[in-house]
Image (cartoon, rainbow, N blue to C red):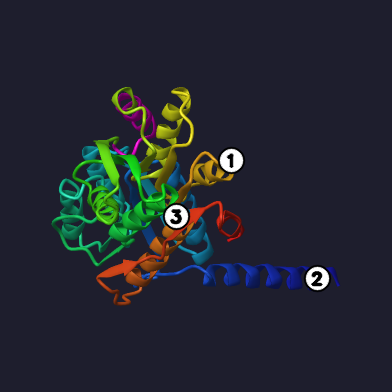
Amino acid sequence: MKKISLFVLLVVISASLIACNSEEESNANGDTISVGYAINTLDNPFFVDVKEAAEEEAKAKGIQISVVNANEDLSEQMSGIEDLIQKQVDVIILDPVDSEGSSAAVNTANEANIPVITTGRTVDEGEVVTHMGYDEVKNGETAGDYLAEKLNEEGKVVEIQGTPGADTAKMRSEGFNKAMEKYPNIEVVATQSADFDRTKGLDVTEDILQSNSDIDGLYAANDEMGLGALQAIKSANLDGIVIVSNDGTKDAFKAIEEGDLSGTMSVSPQAYGEKAVEIALKVANGEKQEKEIELPSEFISQENLKDALNE
């Protein structure tokens, strides 16, 4: 009787192992599909959330994922790409440090015959299977329109731009200024870059406030710079300045909830990471993709924050 029970137990264990293995996605060689994710930076909370979402999605889909962090440095990004090539990943997801400089990383992956997906920023050269991102011009314009609405279409505003040369920064700025052109009674009194960084956003805003302490509103190309600007405004004991930004990070949502930030153009880092892995799996399986895949975005303020938090 004990021998029969032991045999049944072994059968059950074997069946469980087979079931587990069947959930893993395999490539043409029968190996588990492996995805490399070359992220620009993990100093930004947005990309920390992207990374975690990508890893969770990879686990759910039964594929392996290797994440390398460029720390906003082109040479580190190239080194990370070379590491992923050495690991013989099936697909590389690339979040470029720079639209021009990251082209070399794409070319290196092309030479290794590994398909590349870009996210966020595009690259100027190299063969990319598909690009996943947002309508950043629309995002900047929507945030600008909301700022104008909160200011009753008049007043003095400041624009804090992202990293010079990054197409995301260019397009968000283009959209914001497109919005400002609609409102002749709003004056953009200062425009400066803070490289998508919170500390730089603080420093830049402090400098601007020295000669423009009477501003009514501020637009930041991402939440990190917006939150840095918020610190500077609070330190200067200025009240009533309307601040809007982009990204939809947890810190931004908290600042909106507390009434410090008026709103953010939310692009959902969780959806961003999940979709990147989903597309990578399709590419690894040989499924044809559109050259550009646009993700949805939504402006979040106190009016709809509760719904956003419940999603």
Does residue 254 appear left or right of residue 151 in this picture? Answer: right
Q: Are marks 3 and 1 in contact (CB under 8 Å)?
A: no
Identify residue for label 3. 266
Identify residue for label 2. 5
Q: CA distance from mark 2 to mark 1?
A: 61 Å
Identify residue for label 1. 258
Q: Earlier in the sequence, mark 3 or mark 1?
A: 1
x and y percentages locating residue 67 in the rendered image: 39, 48
Residue 202 is one of the magenta-drawn residues: yes
Residue 96 versus residue 289 in the image, above or below: above
Q: CA distance from mark 3 to mark 1?
A: 17 Å
Q: Picture quarter containing residue 202?
A: top left
x and y percentages locating residue 224 in the rendered image: 41, 39
Residue at position x 68%, y 67% in the image:
13
Q: Badge 2: few (under 14), some or many (20 or more) residues near its Cα, within 10 Å?
A: few
Q: Picture quarter containing residue 220?
A: top left
Secondary structure under tag 2 reads: helix
Residue at position x 44%, y 49% in the image:
150
x and y percentages locating residue 213 in the rendered image: 36, 27
Q: CA distance from mark 3 to mark 2?
A: 56 Å
